[in-house]
Image: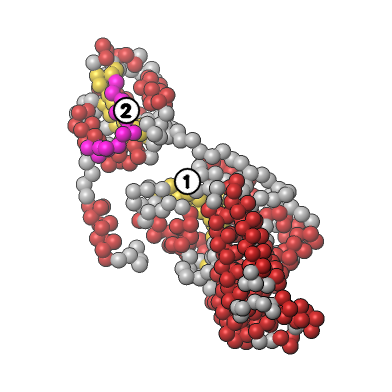
Amino acid sequence: MEGESPQSQKTLQRAASKPKRQISELLSDNLTYLEHIFANSDDIMFLRWSYGPDLQHSACSVYYKSLVQDKSANYMKSSLQDLVTHEVGPATTVTPQDIIKFFGQHGVSEKTASLLDDMDTAVEHISKGHIVIFFDHWNHALTYDAISVETRQVTEPVVESVVQGPRESTVENLQKNIGLLRLRLKTPKFKIVTFQAGGDTQSDVAYGYVEGAVDPGILQEFQQRVEQIKQLEILETSYIEQIIEDSTYSPFPQHRYTERPDVAVAALLDGKIAVMMQGTGSILLCPGLFTEFFQSSEDYYQRTIISTLIRWLRIVAFVMALLLPSIYIALITYHQELVPTVLLLAIIEARERIPLPAFFEALMMEFFFEMLREAGVRLPKPIGSTVSIVGALVIGEAAITANIASPIMVMIVASTGIASLTIPQHTIGIALRILKFPLMLSAGIMGGFGMLICMYLILLHLCQLRTLGIPYLAPLAPLRIAELRDVIMRTSLKVMLPKSTQ
């Protein structure tokens, strides 16, 4: 694979050339090897049992009791009769020769069962929550998918809550998430590709797309980048985002997240690629364009005029969250002549006893506000929101009383924080929180001219930024008139929705 180091290639070659250890015909040899492999693991279970005439033949079920319920393990012993049906008689008369003959000719018909012939694959199946059954005098093993771990049930979305619309949310179970999408996309054009990440985690990863809707060039580029994941330790979809993104050090997110199946399906129909992973409760949508971060699923459940006005409100809030503190610093420090006289007198009176320049005053208040916001996220939920609200009130009032900050500065910082929370996508809000500080610095050094330079650099970065090879500002730059019907304003669904060809 392109981009791999020579050391990585040598490691992969050694792993590929390493001979696999075959399953022995002696049960004792197999168990000795497994006891060595799973040494010091108290949750590994070796369930020995007997079968056949006078129970003279031995077998052993190996599994993790932390992943498999006891009733599933006991069921596997009694299921031997179900697997061999009635061709060899009752289970009490089954011999190793009968098992070898039957499974050698017919294989395993149970949908969750398979036949193994090497120990490496057996160890891998045990680690995934399967039960592997070894028989004495047979160099093969049976394996069943018997994983039974409690997971979160489908509930209402937490991050993307809406007043109107579906109430289902994705969970940490990969198959359930795929099922939620399949339930809404009843077409064979919806393709799902699954694979395993490398390393010790062996994480199950899946990505889906709608054939005919996704751009073949984007899909090919995505598939080339996702190949890297197969040799890496992946714990969450955010790992995948960071591996496949174009610009690692850009503050702007290049892919979207959602926990709503309806949003994921709408994105798939729009030509996006949905990435899911076992153990992750959110779906990664690739690629993510700048304009899409201002869109919410509720925009399409309300009438056109309402959703358009709300979208304009988000755009205004975005500008406020990015520029409001720096505009205040530039006006107070360098451009007092642009402020109306009455307002200027009010500001001067409020700042009369403030010892700090406007830049340091804003920097201090923004720093404390960001600390409170971070504390509110990390604290337990019952007290997190209380600490954020009470802390902001106490610090703001104390700063005004101590003549460290003016009331108008507290109002500007609070307005900036509230404006950043109106953006539907949390990741673009983080970019705003980062970028407002260089804007404040440039406004404090060179006033409005410094702000313009900093804004020009941000716009230049956005224009050259690409996500999976396509321009980040599309369809604004390059301008695509036909695609503007769902950017600044939302066109009627009668025009937007494609007509069925069936």
**Residue 211 found in image quarter:** bottom right
Closer to us: 359 or 116:
359
Closer to us: 23 or 157:
157
Of the residues shown, which amino acid type is indicated by label 1? Answer: Gly
Q: Counting other residues with Cα less than 10 Å from the Cα at mark 2, is it few (<14), some (14-19), or many (20 or more)?
A: many
For residue 21, side relative to residue 404 (left or right): left
Q: Where 57 falls versus 280 (above or below)?
A: above
* Residue visible at 75% across and 57% down in the picture: 493
Closer to us: 138 or 434:
434
Pair 2/1: label in front: 1
Task: Please state, as top left, top right, bottom left or bottom right, where the N terminus lies in the image.
Answer: bottom left
How has the structure been colored for display? secondary structure
Residue 394 placement (x, y as % from top left): 64, 60
Residue 446 placement (x, y as % from top left): 59, 86
* Residue visible at 71% across and 48% down in the picture: 165
Closer to us: 390 or 108:
390
Q: Which type of secondary structure does the marked residue at label 2 adopt?
A: strand
Residue 340 placement (x, y as % from top left): 78, 83
Of the residues shown, which amino acid type is indicated by label 2? Answer: Ser
Q: Start and end of the magenta stretch? A: 36-49
Residue 61's label in the rendered image is 2
Residue 279's label in the rendered image is 1
Counting every numbered tag in the picture gives: 2
Question: Is residue 40 located in the magenta-colored stretch of the structure?
Answer: yes
